[in-house]
Amino acid sequence: MTDLMPPTKNKWWKHPDVKKTFIYWLILTPAVAIFGTQFHVLAMPDPASEVMSGVITLMRVFTWAASPVAALVFAMCATALTSQRHYGDNPPAEADHQISNSPRANALWIVISAVMCLFALVVGLIVLQKDGDALHEAGAINVNVTGQQWAWNYDYTNGARSEVLYLPVDVPVIFHITSKDVKHSFWVVEMGIKMDANPGYTTEAAVTPNKIGVFNVRCAELCGLLHAYMQNKVHVVSKADYEKWLADRSALEARS
Amino acid sequence: MTTTMNHPAAATGKSRTPIIERLNIVTAFALGAISAFVVWRLALQFLPPDSEVRLFTREDKITLLSMIAWFVGFMTGIGALVGPFRWVTGKDLSHDENMFLAGKDMGIKRYFRYTTDHKVVGIQYLVITMVIFGIGGILAMLIRANLGTPEGGLIHPQAYNSIVGTHGIIMIVGTIIMVTGPIGNFIMPIMIGARDMAFPRLNALSFWLIVAAAIPLIWAQFIGGISTGWSAYNPLAGQAPLGMNGYIMFICIFALSTMVAGANITTTVVRMRAKGMTWNRTPIFIYGVVASVALALPAFPVFFLSQVMSGMDRALDTSFYNTAGGGSGWLYENLFWIMGHPEVYVILIPAVAALMEMAPVFTRRPLFSFNVAVMGIAGISGLSILVWAHHMYISGWAPLLNAPFMLTTELISIPTGMLFLVLVGTLWRGRLWMTMPTLSIFALLWNFMIGGITGIYLSDVPADAFLHGSMYVTAHFHYTLMGAGLTGALASLVYWFPKMTGRMFDKKLSWISFWMVQVGFNVTFGGMFIVGLQGQPRRVEAYAALFNKGNLITSIGAAVIMSGMLVLLYGVISSWRHGVVAPMNPWHAKTLEWTVANPIPLENFAVLPVVTSDPYGYGKEKK
C-alpha cells in the first residue's frame, strides 16, 4: 500500500486502486467473517459440554480475527482483476511503474501477521490451560476406556462393565484410555474431546457433560478392517438415573 | 549435431554390441523379474520355518527378500551400475560413451533407457507424474463411489482400506515430484544457465529409482494391500497383511530417489549458476526448488529408517514399535511426522515459487519484494522441521509439549503470510495478461487462504481435539496440497509446455480444464469440510445418515474434477502432437530458459550466458 508512494506529491491513498480496494475490503470483511463462522457453527454439533462450547467459540474468534486479512487479500485480487485486464496472444504494454519493493508495506504486513499469530497463541493457551485443569478436578468419577478391534469397553470403579457409556450430567469425569491391540482414538463427538488409545500406555482426558441426551463415540484413528463401525453411544442421564444404572450394572457383573 | 556418433564398439574393433548399449527398460524389467523369482524360489526352499508362534514372519522375509532382489536386478538391468563398475575397474566412461548415455541422436528410444540428459529426465518425470495422478485419481473416484451411500459396501473393507492407503501414498509421491521432477529437471538447469545437472548419472538414477519403487507397490496390491492408510502407523502396520512389505520397499526406494535428487539439485544450483548470476539475481523459482529438495534431504532418511525398522519388526521379530517388547508406537509416529511435516512444504514451496516466477511475466511488472519472498521460503523451511508433533497433540505422547508445538506451528503463518504478500504485491497495479497461469495465481491465493486459515484452527490444541482425525483434516490438506500445490504445478505445465515440447498448450482447453478443476475442487472439499465439522472420521468406508448431504456434494465435485482433469489430459496429448509451434519466447519472459532455441540442443548453450541483472525488469522506469 505504501508501495504506491509515487515520486510526485500525490498522496498514496488517493490512488483509485487504493480506494477501490478499501471499498471491497469493507464489504468483504464482514462477508467473509459471517460466512466463515456460519459455515463452521451450523455444521458443528450442538455442544454437550463446556469444552465443546469452548471449541465453537474458538472457531468464531479465529474466523473473525482472520477475516480482515483474508478479505484484504481477496480485495486486492478483486482490484487487480477489475482494473487492467488484457486478453490475447501477445502481452500487454508493460506496467507504468517499476515498484519492486516497499519496506513499509513489508514491515506492516509482518508486524500484523506476528500480532495475529500471538493472538491465536494466547487464546489457544488460555483454553488449553482450562482443559488441562479439568484432569485434576476433585470429585470426578473415573472411567477406564479400553479400545479393541472394533469396540469400546468401559470399566467403572465399582466393578461395573459396559459396552455403552453412561455418564451423569454435570459431574466431571476423567477417562483413562488404553488399547488392547492397535492404536484407536476415543472421540466423544458432541463433547469435543478426543484422545488416542495406545496399547501399553494409559492416556487421560477429562470432560463435564452438561446436557442430558444420547451422544456419539467414534474411533478417529484407522484401526483396521471395521474401523468405520467402531462407534457407539454415550448416554448422559440425571444423577439419580446414573446411580441406579451403575448399581444394576455392578450387580449384574457380580452375578456373572 | 551433424556428426554421427563414433561407435564405441567400432573404436575397440569388436563386432559385439557393448553392454552399455544393450541395457534399457526391457532388460531392466527382465533382470528384475528373474532375480525376484530366483530369490523367491531359493528363500522358499531354504528359509527355516518359524519357531515362534507369529503370523507372517517367514512369509515377510521371503517377500522382502524377493522385493530387494527385484530392486537390485532392475537397477542392474537398467544400467545404473555401469558407471560405478567402470570407475572401480579404472576404465571410466569415454566422451563418446557419455554422449551415448546422454541420448545423443537417439530419438524416442532415449526415453526408455538410463539417459543422463536433464531434458530427457524431465520429460520422463512429467510422464510418470501424469501416470501417478491418473492412477491416484481413479483410486479417489473409487473411494467416492464407495462413499456414494452411507452403507458403503461397494468394495470390501480390506480392499477399501488399501485403496485409501494407496491413493494417499502415491498422491503424496506424485505431488512431491510434480514440480521438482519435470520442471526442476528440464527447466531449472537452463534457467540458471547450465549445460546439465551437476551429476547427470545421479539424475537418471533418481528417476529410475521411482520406476523401481513402483513395482513393489503394485505387487503389494496382490498380497493383501496396504490396509493402514498412507501413514502406516504401527502397531497396525505390524499386523497388516503381506502387502505392507510392498509399502516398506516402496518408501525405502523412493526415499533413496529423493535423497539422490536432493543432493544433485542442490549441488547444481550452488555450483553451476551462470556467470554473474549472484544470489540476488537468481530467479525465485530456483529458491523454491532448492528449498524443497534441501528440506527433503534431512526428512527422507528419517522416513527410510522408520520403514527399515518397520520391516525388521515384521520380518525379524524386533520390537522397535511393539510395546510388549519394549518399543513404542509413538516412536513410529515421531519418525513418521519428522518426515511428514517438512514433506508437505517439500510439495508446496516449489509450486508457490513457480507461480511467483510467473507473476511478473503475466502482470508485466517486477516481482514485489524479492527479499521477502526469499525470507518467506527460508522461514517456512526452517520452521517446518520444528512442528512435527502437532500431528500428535492427542496421541498422548507428551501433553506438555503441546504448547511449544502450537507456538512453532502458528509461527509458520508469518513466513507463509510473506508468500501471500509477494503474490498480491505483484498483482497490485500490474497489467494482467489473462492466461491460465494468471488465473492460477488467483486460484492459489483463494485455495491457499482457505487451507491456511483452516490450518490455524487445526494448530490450536483444543480445536484440534475436536477436529483431529476427522474429514476436516482431509479437506484442509487437500486445500493446501491440491488447491495450492497442484494448481501451481498445472500452471507450470502450461507455462513451460512451449519450452518442453516446442508447442503451445491449447489455450481454450487450458481454460476449460482450469475452471472445471477449480470449481470441482472447491465443491468437493467444501462438502468434506462440512462432514468433518459434523463429526465424520477419516478413512471410514461407511457413515451415519447425518453425513449424507456433505458426502453427496463431495462426490459430485469429485466427478467434476475428474472431467476437468480428462480435458487437461486431452489438452496435453493434442497440444503435444499437433499444437501451434511455439516461438522461442512466447510469454516475453526474461529468464534464461527462454533464450535457447526450440528444440533445445543437447547441451543447451553453445556459449554459456553471462547474467547482468535480475530477471524481473518489467515496467517503465520512473521519470
Image (cartoon, coloured by chain):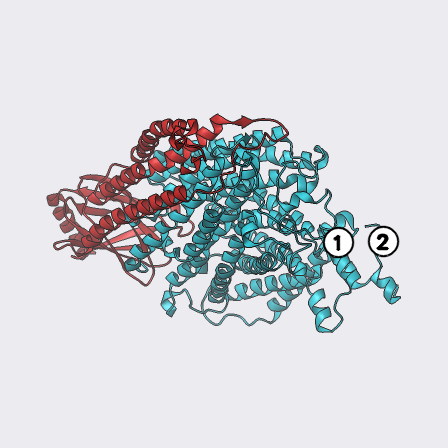
Circle on res. B103: 1
Identity of the residue drawn at 27% across and 53% down? A153
Q: Residue tagged by mark 2? A: B4
Q: Earlier in the sequence, mark 1 or mark 2?
A: 2
Secondary structure at badge 2 equals loop
Q: Which chain is red?
A: A
Question: Horizontally, is B133 left or right of B322 in the view?
Answer: right
- The quarter of the image holding the C terminus of chain A is bottom left
Position in image of residue B49 (x %, y %): 53, 70
Which corner quadrant of the image does residue A76 belong to?
Answer: top left
Position in image of residue B84 (x %, y %): 69, 68
Crowd rating for badge 1 (residues with CA inside 10 Å; few <14, some 14–19, many 20+): many
Single out the residue that lies furthest toward the left: A240
Please count the marks in the image.
Answer: 2
Whether residue B501 is visible, yes or no, is: yes
Crowd rating for badge 2 (residues with CA inside 10 Å; few <14, some 14–19, many 20+): few
Secondary structure at badge 1 equals loop
Q: Nearer the viewer, residue B191 or A97?
A: A97
User: How far apart are the two marked residues, 1 and 2, measured between alpha carbons?
Assistant: 13 Å
Up the image or down, B598 lies above or below B241; here it is above
Identity of the residue drawn at 34% across and 60% down? A199
Which corner quadrant of the image does residue B66 belong to?
Answer: bottom right
Position in image of residue B571 (x %, y %): 64, 34
Whether residue A161 is visible, yes or no, is: no
Q: Chain of mark 2?
A: B
- Residue type at mark 1: give it: Gly
Q: Which colour is chain B painted?
A: cyan
Q: Chain of mark 1?
A: B
Q: Are marks 1 and 2 on the same chain?
A: yes
Q: Nearer the viewer, residue B198 or B429?
A: B429
Question: Horizontally, is A53 left or right of A111 in the view?
Answer: left
Position in image of residue B545 (x %, y %): 36, 34
